Image (cartoon, rainbow, N blue to C red):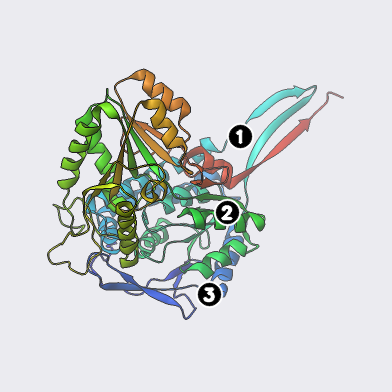
């Protein structure tokens, strides 16, 4: 098959019980190319009847799917992996057109998603739960993992190709049915993924797609036929999703926002650290929860490191994501661009030194796009808004500290605990940060602490609500429950 990559595209559709169908409510919105401001598709919002249909189809499919031998359940995943590989370039182009990031970033995102499909193909080993003979006289005990039913995931705009694959492969490989509700901002990639899923050969009802807004999300969270929900998005929404789903007796994992720190010590390779720091803060337009945008630098190298960061940031090219020369693409919506501009203004008002102002950037031929160039503040303080709040734009702030102890204190005072990075040449400093940093993902001499698919994606404090994280072994625990089988066969 060939995926259509040139908009405008037909209206986005739901995929329910193996059939493509238009959402049935009267609500919806245009899907807009962030670089051009042009409508490239339309997404209708699902009604409660659509949600009911998807859940009912999932429940019906679960009965047979959960009893399908595991080696058969993973065969469509092997097929899906190959289809994703074959169509990666086409998917990446669609992603750029509706999201705004660069083509290289889109391909990297999809590669990360494919990794999760690969890991989920190993479910036959990952689902093994343990056996102990002679646990007591004449008694053997065995733990058996069982799937639970229909699960849902509500995923964000910033990684529309990768984040659905944090959940979907593990849910179905363990024997559950799965419903995806992607972001209404860029839902075309999700539809393209499901065109490949349809070709991969999953039974009808095992994997489904419903589009919509807040009402659709609430309908899924409230539905008695949903066993558990996964969410990725901002902290206020993550907290609301967690509370609502948990109140309805569901398993829930909700990844929230972030305010990530980089610590740069005097022993670091400063040129390397500056390049990786700017990339972390500004790649994907800064629209990612792993963006490290508070840079805490030992005072002995603060001035030198600041100069290197400014040089690196000023060299970034802002433009259309499909242009080879582009380093930073468009932000998702005009409203989000306006929010980032307001946060930059707050930094100036609160006394931070604006060292590089990216607000006046112009991209020839794309005057209606949502563009911002890298913006760098110096002498930021922990109480400033731009240090406390997630910006989700290409903005970073630098502050000087006396030593690593002060840097760790600054970092740990944050309400968030998603990720951090340390640049150092000193093993003792690295060990200290490793033991004392209150974050879920920690990189040492790595600008972006993104775990591979066979490890879970961490998060603490206001960056995560729940117990079991996305990716890896945590997904097996989330999507299954253990039955302890106690067996006695006395000689008599």
Label 3 neighbourhood size at 10 Å, few (<14), some (14-19), many (20+)?
A: many
Of 70 and 366, the residue lying toward us: 366
Residue ID for mark 1: 129
- Name the residue located 42 percent from the left edge and 62 percent from the top edge: 183
- Direction right: furthest residue: 492
| Rendered view: 259 above or below 89 | above
Point out the frontmost of discs 2 and 1: 2
Mark 2 or 3, nearer chain start: 3
Residue at the extreme bottom of the image, as rendered = 26
SS label for mark 2: helix
Q: What residue did someone put label 3 on?
A: 47
Residue bearing mark 2: 242
So how many labels did they put on this image? 3
Q: Is residue 332 visible?
A: no
**Left or right: 112 with respect to 275?**
right
Asked if labels 3 and 1 touch by Cβ distance under 8 angstroms, the answer is no
Residue 118 in the image: x percent, y percent?
40, 42
């Amino acid at each position: 098959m060939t995926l259509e990559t040139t908009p405008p595209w037909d209206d986005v559709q739901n995929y329910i019980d193996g059939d493509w169908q238009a959402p049935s409510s009267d609500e919806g919105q245009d899907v807009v190319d962030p670089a051009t401001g042009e409508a490239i598709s339309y997404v209708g919002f699902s009604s409660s009847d659509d949600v009911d249909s998807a859940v009912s189809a999932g429940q019906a499919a679960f009965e047979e799917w959960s009893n399908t031998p595991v080696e058969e359940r993973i065969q469509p995943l092997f097929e899906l992996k190959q289809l994703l590989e074959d169509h990666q370039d086409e998917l990446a182009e669609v992603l750029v057109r509706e999201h705004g990031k660069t083509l290289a970033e889109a391909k990297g995102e999809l590669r990360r998603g494919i990794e999760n499909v690969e890991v989920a193909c190993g479910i036959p080993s990952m689902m093994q739960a343990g056996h102990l003979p002679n646990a007591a006289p004449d008694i053997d005990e065995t733990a058996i993992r069982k799937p639970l039913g229909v699960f849902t995931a509500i995923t964000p705009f910033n990684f529309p190709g990768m984040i659905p694959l944090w959940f979907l492969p593990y849910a179905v490989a363990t024997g559950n049915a799965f419903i995806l509700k992607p972001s209404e901002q860029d839902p075309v990639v999700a539809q393209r993924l499901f065109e490949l899923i349809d070709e991969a050969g999953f039974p009808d009802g095992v994997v489904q797609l419903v589009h919509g807004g807040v009402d659709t999300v609430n309908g899924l969270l409230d539905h008695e036929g949903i066993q558990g929900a996964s969410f990725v998005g901002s902290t206020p929404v993550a907290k609301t999703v967690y509370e609502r789903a948990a109140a309805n007796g569901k398993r829930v994992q909700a990844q929230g926002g972030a305010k990530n720190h980089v610590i740069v010590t005097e022993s670091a390779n400063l040129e390397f650290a500056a390049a990786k720091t700017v990339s972390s803060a500004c790649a994907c337009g800064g629209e990612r929860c792993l963006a490290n945008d508070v840079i805490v630098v030992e005072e002995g190298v603060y001035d030198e490191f600041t100069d290197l960061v400014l040089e690196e940031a000023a060299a970034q090219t802002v433009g259309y994501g499909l242009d080879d020369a582009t380093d930073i693409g468009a932000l998702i919506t005009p409203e989000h661009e306006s929010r980032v501009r307001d946060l930059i203004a707050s930094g100036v008002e609160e006394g931070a030194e604006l060292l590089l102002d990216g607000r006046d950037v112009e991209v020839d031929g794309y005057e209606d796009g949502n563009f911002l160039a890298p913006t760098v503040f110096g002498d930021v303080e922990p109480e400033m808004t731009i240090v406390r709040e997630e910006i989700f734009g290409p903005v970073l702030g630098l502050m000087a500290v006396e030593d690593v102890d002060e840097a760790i204190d600054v970092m740990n005072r944050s309400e968030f605990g998603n990720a951090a990075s340390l640049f150092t040449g000193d093993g003792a400093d690295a060990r200290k940060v490793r033991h004392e940093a209150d974050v879920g993902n920690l990189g040492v001499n790595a600008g972006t602490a993104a775990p591979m698919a066979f490890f879970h994606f961490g998060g603490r404090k206001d960056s995560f609500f729940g117990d079991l994280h996305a990716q890896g072994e945590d997904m097996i625990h989330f999507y299954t429950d253990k039955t302890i089988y106690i067996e006695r066969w006395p000689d008599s």
